[in-house]
Image (cartoon, rainbow, N blue to C red):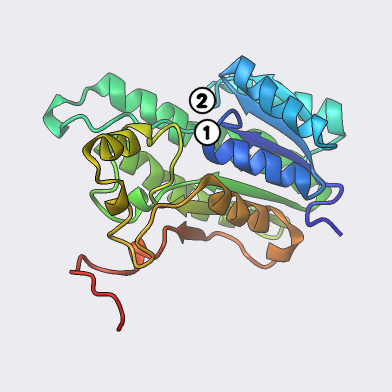
């Protein structure tokens, strides 16, 4: 039996990268998926791809950090599917690597609006429905940048650290409700957000060094993050709550070191 058979789900940031991989995997595993992204044409293309493969998907154009848009996509999921069993609040922006003293209040506000207020709004408007039905899974995208320095810019890292705290505090706020809240912390994954890193390495001929700081010595793929999101959204994770899971090739397990292959 498919792992999300009969589940009614939402995936934000579904037009590309981790969100697209997750929407496709959720549908493949039997879920009806509401695909949300502010890139209207791209998110509609993802939903169409899922439908052509025999799945159930609806596309909604919206800004994850806008309460009006969040209310709209939640209402659309209820009207289309009759309820919501799981949401993957994945949408986010990187904000680039602007040096600290060149960062502006406006940059911080925008990154926090999308990366932290976005998941808050998703939880705020989905959780009451889940609490009423006595069950539900909420998954958020955090980052290894939330756990250690030098994996992202200051505002990005702070926003993702906030996501982990949000997951922990809301998991406890929903005490006794049957609603679970967890986070995934991706490491270096090849997505639209990280394109500049990968493109620069390829131009310099150093692509083989990408991911060298983790014990698997490689970057990850969106599908590898989607697999963790699938687990957390499914009933297989029924006793997993208030946790943040690094999926980073082992990067966050260690201090910096000079790697040496086993003989």
Res 44 → quadrant: top right
Task: Give the answer, above or below, for where 38 lies relative to 99.
Answer: above
86 on left or right of 142: right
At x 12%, y 29%, the residue is 101
What residue occupies the far front of the structure in this picture? 205
At x 77%, y 46%, the residue is 28
Q: Nearer the viewer, residue 72 or 200?
A: 200
At x 30%, y 84%, the residue is 263
132 on left or right of 167: right
Residue 65 is labelled as 2
For disc 1, the marked residue is 91
Res 109 → quadrant: top left
Q: Secondary structure at mark 1?
A: loop
Residue 1 drawn at (x, y percent): 87, 60
Residue 184 drawn at (x, y percent): 51, 53
> First in sequence: mark 1 or mark 2?
2
Task: Give the answer, above or below, for where 165 lies relative to 260.
Answer: above
Task: Give the answer, above or below, for where 50 lies relative to 69.
Answer: below
Residue 213 is labelled as none
């Amino acid at each position: 039996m498919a792992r999300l058979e009969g589940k009614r789900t939402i995936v934000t940031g579904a037009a590309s990268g981790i969100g697209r991989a997750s929407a496709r995997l959720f549908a493949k595993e039997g879920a009806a998926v509401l695909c949300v992204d502010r890139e209207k044409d791209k998110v509609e293309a993802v939903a169409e791809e899922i439908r052509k493969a025999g799945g159930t998907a609806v596309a909604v154009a919206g800004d994850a950090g806008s309460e009006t848009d969040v209310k709209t996509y939640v209402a659309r999921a209820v009207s289309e599917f009759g309820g919501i069993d799981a949401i993957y609040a994945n949408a986010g922006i990187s904000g680039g690597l602007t040096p600290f003293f060149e960062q502006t209040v406006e940059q911080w506000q925008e990154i926090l609006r999308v990366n932290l207020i976005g998941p808050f709004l998703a939880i705020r408007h989905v959780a009451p429905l889940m609490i009423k039905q006595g069950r539900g899974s909420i998954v958020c995208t955090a980052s290894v940048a939330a756990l250690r320095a030098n994996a992202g810019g200051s505002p990005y890292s702070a926003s993702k650290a906030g996501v982990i705290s949000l997951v922990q505090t809301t998991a406890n706020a929903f005490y006794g409700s049957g609603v679970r809240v967890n986070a995934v912390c991706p490491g270096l994954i090849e997505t639209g957000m990280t394109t500049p890193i990968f493109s620069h390495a390829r131009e310099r001929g150093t692509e083989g060094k990408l991911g060298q700081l983790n014990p698997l010595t490689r970057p990850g793929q969106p599908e590898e993050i989607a697999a963790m999101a699938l687990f957390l959204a499914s009933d297989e994770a029924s006793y997993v709550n208030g946790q943040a899971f690094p999926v980073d090739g082992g990067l966050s397990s260690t201090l910096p070191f000079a790697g040496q292959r086993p003989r």
